[in-house]
Every structure is written in structure tokens, then in C-alpha cells.
Image (spheres, coloured by chain):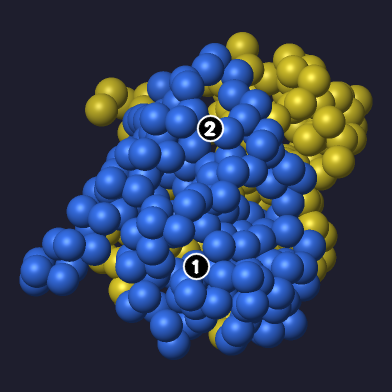
Chain colours: A blue, B yellow
Amino acid sequence: MNKISTAVLLLATAAFATASRAEAPAAKPVHGEYKDWLTLSISHRLEKQLMRTILGNEVAIKAARAGNTKPWPDGSIIAKVGWKEKTHPNWPQAVVPGEFAGAEAMIKDSKKYAETGGWGFGHWEGNKLVMNDKEKSATCFACHAPMKDNDYVYTAPVLQ
Amino acid sequence: MNKISTAVLLLATAAFATASRAEAPAAKPVHGEYKDWLTLSISHRLEKQLMRTILGNEVAIKAARAGNTKPWPDGSIIAKVGWKEKTHPNWPQAVVPGEFAGAEAMIKDSKKYAETGGWGFGHWEGNKLVMNDKEKSATCFACHAPMKDNDYVYTAPVLQ
């Protein structure tokens, strides 16, 4: 891994650790409005032992289905919902969600968030969406900068 | 792995291979009505190199949110949507969906499918849901039989 990749990875880890601390573990977590959103894609983040589903609000889903994501339209919200990975207790060949680890948001507003590629970064604390301050958003954006040609988004929508 | 586990695994692999063959690979696959359904959970099936999202129709989601899944009510449909796993081209620590591999269904009708625990098994061919014949359903059911105490369902809903 080169130095830039390592730096990006450390930043990502730091950003997530901060988000996770804000979410007190709970037997049954309270989810935000994303629980009523449709799927853009999923991922298994091996370096964080996280299972993630990536959901979109109505604007984002409509854009993804129309192939209108370069750039994503203003009003798009992408929710990245993560759980610690767990081996399925009855099917050890499957990795499934364990403890809820937190949900992060990317909100497109090309004017409001012009400094960070048009994206605002935040996370849900329970069902409340809390936007990050500028310093923390800059950290988030640093990890997304390599995806400039994809409007700074790593997720490729797969369920259109 | 004991003999029963091996047998179950082989049956599961056989069942999925059959479903996969029915789905001709396409650049942009046609999805069934599940594309408008909400998330129950996700999984990474290591033995099949598959990434899966598990979605529910309105009846299933309502049941999951109410904790009313032992048994799931008649009319519940669970869609298991799979893609071949792929390393994210710009983030090699992430496994993400690659080529679409197929979508399978479990439909609850305690009378119609009484012989297989009240569940009918099928798969989508494009946007058309095709129910399996009795022989193939028996193969599906054999893999789900160990989950009898969970109404034959492996998925634990996580986004309630």
C-alpha cells in the first residue's frame, strides 16, 4: 500500500471511529428515515469487519435508475448503514450483520456544500441526522476525493 | 464439516446453480418487483462468492418490524438477491456486488405450501417470478429444515 492509500485508510478509520462512538450500542437500535429507503448497493468492508447496505432517498433512487448520477442531483441522500460482521450461527459459510455500528449520510447540495464536492457528510444519532462540522467533513471528503470522476461516490448502484 | 453439513451445502449449491442458469448474464439485468422492496438484511456467502441483499415485500417488512416472524404471516415474500462478489476497483478492502447472479423467493402460504413448512420456493427470471416444482422445492426446503425453530428462515431482520 502506498503512502497516500495508507493516509486515506487512516482517515477513513478515524472518521468512522468517531461516528461509532456517537452511537451507543443498543439491543435494538433506533434507525433513521433510511430504514424506509430502497437499496443502491451493499458492501463488505473487510478492513473494518463491517457489513454495509447503501440506501438512497427517493431523489437518489430516481437518479440511480435513470443513470443520472454524474453528478447526482441536489437533494440526493445516500445512507451507508453498517453492522459489525458476524458468522451466521447456523450457516458458517455466511457473513451477516452483527451489532449495529452506525449509519452515515452523504447529502448532495451543490451550493451549500460546494467546498466538499457538493456533498455534505453526516451521520445518524438514533433517528436524528447530524451533519458533520467543516473539519470533519473535510476528513470525509479526503477519502472520497479519488472518486472525483464518479461525483465522489464509491457506490455503484446495482438494483435499478 | 460433518456429513449432514456437507450434504446441505451440496444441495444449496445445486439449487443455486440451477437458478443461475435460468438467468442469462446481461449488462443491465431486468429485476423483479423486489427492486421496490425494503431491506431485511444482507449477507456475504463465502462458499458461493456471492453478495446478497435480502428484501421483503410489504407484508414481510411489516411482520419483521412487529417482531411477528414466528411464524411469518401468509403473504410474506422474502427475496434473496445475489451478485457475484467483486473487489471494489478503487477500494480493495471492500467486497461489492459484481455480475448479477439471480434472485430467489420464499413465499409464505401455510396452506398451499404446507408440505414445505408453509413456504413456496421460486426465483425470478427477469421480472417474472417462477415458482419451483415440488421436486426442486423439496431440495430448497431440505436446506431450510435446520431452521425449523425460526420458521425455516435463515435471515434475521436487522433494519426494523
Q: What element carries label 2?
A: helix
Answer yes or no: is residue B82 visible. no
Quadrant position of the N terminus of chain A in the picture: bottom left
Question: Can the viewer see residue B131?
Answer: yes
Q: Distance between the residues labelled 1 and 2?
A: 33 Å
Do residues under tags 1 and 2 come within 8 Å of each other at their CB atoms? no
Image coordinates for residue A39, horizontal then vertical, percent: 65, 57
Q: Mark 1 points at which residue?
A: A155
Type of the residue with mark 2 = Cys
The residue under the point 50% across, 50% down is A132
Name the foreground residue: A120 vs B129.
A120
Residue nearest the viewer, comparing B103 with B21: B103
A143 vs A72, left or right, is left
Q: Which residue is drawn at 18% across and 68% down?
A: A5
Q: Position of residue B112 (x, y in %)?
A: 89, 32
Q: Of the residues shown, which amino acid type is indicated by label 1? A: Thr
Q: In this view, does A112 lie above or below A71?
A: above
- Which of the chains bears the disc numbered 2? B
Question: Which quadrant of the figure contains the C terminus of chain A?
Answer: bottom right
The label on residue A124 is none
Q: How far across and down, in percent of the image, does residue B63 sit?
A: 81, 26
- Residue A32 occupies which quadrant of the picture? top right
Circle 2 residues within 10 Å: few <14, some 14–19, many ≥20: some
Q: Which residue is drawn at 52% across and 57% down?
A: A121
Q: Mark 2 points at which residue?
A: B143
